[in-house]
Image: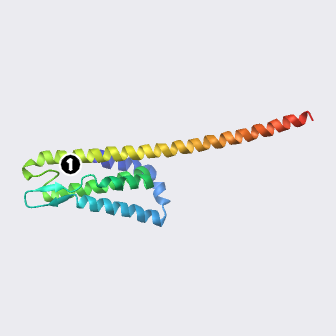
């Protein structure tokens, strides 16, 4: 789980420290709200029906939160909210002695199921955040190329006008 969530969080946190300093109060509140929602979803992930049955209430309820954090805060938001969710889910599953699945006798397969769920969430959310960021960068490059083309066109028109004045 550390490789899936902690390492990407560390990698994205290092270059994002400058971005953290530029967040407004509203953005900080939004980021903290995302973390609190991820914490709540991780805490509510396991619901006890009776002493022997534990199950995941809605395993993919975290995806809207990850999409929200990816759109607003890119990789930093996605990895940090994913880390919050994983820490709470791992703590809660360890505390209850259960993981995804039905009975405590299947603890090994349940832990494997939890790790697979974490893998699915990590890969899909990180892929989405990377795709979103590369799309934003492509749009920025396109806008810059259009601006350069417009400036080049204007310079060409100025040069053509000066050239025509030479023969007047």
Q: Where is residue 130 in the image (x, y as percent from the top left)?
A: 42, 44
Residue drawn 26% across the image and 55% down it? 87
Q: Where is residue 114 in the image (x, y as percent from the top left)?
A: 20, 48
Q: Is residue 16 left or right of residue 112?
A: right
Q: In this view, does 119 lie to the left or right of 126?
A: left
Residue 30: which quarter of the image?
Answer: bottom left
Q: Where is residue 7 in the image (x, y as percent from the top left)?
A: 33, 46
How has the structure been colored for display? Answer: rainbow
Q: Return the residue at label 1.
A: 114
At numbered mark 1, what does the secondary structure look like: helix, strand or loop?
helix
Q: Is residue 117 above or below residue 38?
A: above
Q: Position of residue 47 (x, y in %)?
A: 17, 60
Q: For the view shown, which residue lies furthest in the top direction?
A: 167
Q: Is residue 161 left or right of residue 50?
A: right
- Total marks shown come to 1
Q: Label 1: few (<14), some or many (≥20) within 10 Å? A: many
Q: In this view, does 93 lie above or below 126?
A: below
In the rendered image, which quarter contains the C terminus? top right
Q: In this view, does 33 lie to the left or right of 135?
A: left
Quick one: 13 or 110, which is closer to the camera? 110
Residue drawn 16% across the image and 52% down it? 99
Residue drawn 34% across the image and 60% down it? 35
């Amino acid at each position: 789980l550390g490789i899936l969530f902690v390492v990407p969080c560390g990698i994205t946190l290092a270059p994002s420290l400058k971005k953290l300093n530029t967040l407004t109060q509203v953005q900080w509140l939004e980021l903290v709200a995302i973390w609190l929602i991820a914490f709540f979803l991780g805490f509510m992930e396991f619901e006890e029906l009776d002493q022997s049955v534990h199950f995941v209430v809605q395993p993919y309820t975290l995806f809207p939160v990850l999409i929200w954090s990816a759109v607003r805060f890119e990789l930093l938001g996605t990895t940090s909210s994913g880390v919050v969710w994983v820490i709470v889910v791992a703590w809660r599953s360890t505390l209850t002695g259960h993981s995804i699945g039905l009975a405590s006798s299947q603890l090994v397969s349940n832990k494997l199921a939890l790790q697979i769920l974490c893998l699915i969430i990590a890969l899909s959310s990180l892929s989405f955040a990377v795709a979103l960021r590369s799309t934003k960068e492509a749009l920025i490059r396109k806008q810059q190329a259009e601006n350069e083309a417009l400036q080049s066109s204007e310079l060409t028109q100025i040069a053509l006008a000066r050239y025509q004045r030479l023969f007047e």
